[in-house]
Image (cartoon, rainbow, N blue to C red):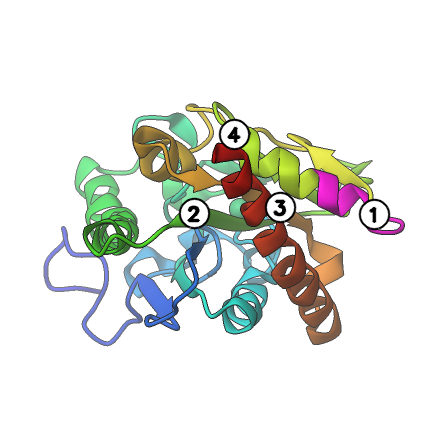
Amino acid sequence: MSARPDKLLAADEPAPVSIYNAGGQSPFLLVGDHAGNLIPRALGRLGVAEAELQRHIAWDIGIAALGRLLADALDATFIRQNYSRLVIDCNRSLDVASSIPDIGERTLIPGNIDMSEANRAARATEIFWPYHNRIEAELDRRLRAGRAAALIPLHSFTPVFKDVARRWHIAVLYNRDPRFAQRLKALLDAERELVVGDNEPYTVNDATDFTVPAHAERCGLHHVLIEIRQDLIANQDGQQRWAARLARLLPLAYQQLLAAEI
Ligand SMILES: [Zn+2]
């Protein structure tokens, strides 16, 4: 335990944010809000069984590896958050109940029930804000340098949620600005045998999302949120296949988008 009750991460614990290929020249900034499943030692596993912390309720399975492969293929920067969404969900506003969830699918999270305000504040200060401040700093740096930027949040979804199977292989999600998402969807639809979700099984909205509204919609940045079904990227073969597909289609969709603006 930390000597200071209001301090969450000890000096020897991993940083909340990892930057991969920081010097990447691609306009795409890849981000992984749910890419890790670490739990700060001070939280004692949140009272959740170890097997549960390996499931989709704790993180987006496959996204850390997919993000690195896609970053390599595109020469893009990939910024990811390393702690579990059960500690604090980095794709939720701090003022919504699911920011620090007390349940994940059907699993209760005892460590998140009746928390102190100091505990809640420490998670925001030490995990949520360092991650989002790092994304904002990277986007600011590009803006100042006159470089184009497009935000690509990468997520994965469980193939079965509350006993309901999901048929989509991949989905594009958006809210106020569908332009990039619709172009990428059209290209994915043209691939053989893919079932592509259009704002399914989730949508982007202000209650369930933070990253797109805060970093992209607010300043009119091009963006598309991508969700891939977890069983397709659970191993290296699948991760490589999907990274190669997205490395081929994302630049095409982006070129179409820019051409339409001329
Ligand atoms: Zn996610």
Q: Residue at x 66, y 54 (%)?
A: 249
Looking at the rendering, which quadrant does residue 219 occupy? top left
Which residue corresponds to mark 1?
194
Q: Earlier in the sequence, mark 4 or mark 3?
A: 4
Q: Residue at x 61, y 46 (%)?
A: 253
SS for dot 1? loop
x and y percentages locating residue 228 in the rendered image = 67, 50
Which residue corresponds to mark 3?
227
> Which is in the foreground here, disc 3 or disc 1?
1
Q: Earlier in the sequence, mark 1 or mark 2?
A: 2
Q: Amino acid at mark 1?
A: Leu
Q: Nearer the viewer, residue 25 or 131?
A: 25
Q: CA distance from mark 3 to mark 1?
A: 13 Å
Q: Residues within 10 Å of mark 4 (few under 14, many from 20)?
A: many
Q: Are marks 2 and 3 in contact (CB under 8 Å)?
A: no
Q: Is mark 3 within 8 Å of ligand 1?
A: yes
Q: Are marks 2 and 4 in contact (CB under 8 Å)?
A: no
Q: Which mark is residue 151?
A: 2
Q: Is residue 150 above or below residue 65?
A: above
Q: Amino acid at mark 2?
A: Leu
Q: Is residue 105 visible?
A: no
Q: Residues within 10 Å of mark 2 (few under 14, many from 20)?
A: many
Q: Residue at x 47, y 29 (%)?
A: 208
Q: Nearer the viewer, residue 87 or 230?
A: 230
Q: CA distance from mark 4 to mark 1?
A: 22 Å
Q: Which residues are magenta?
A: 186-193
Which residue corresponds to mark 4?
204
Q: Amino acid at mark 4?
A: Val
Q: CA distance from mark 4 to mark 3?
A: 11 Å
Q: Nearer the viewer, residue 104 or 192?
A: 192
x and y percentages locating residue 58 in the rendered image = 52, 52
Looking at the rendering, which quadrant does residue 41 occupy? bottom left
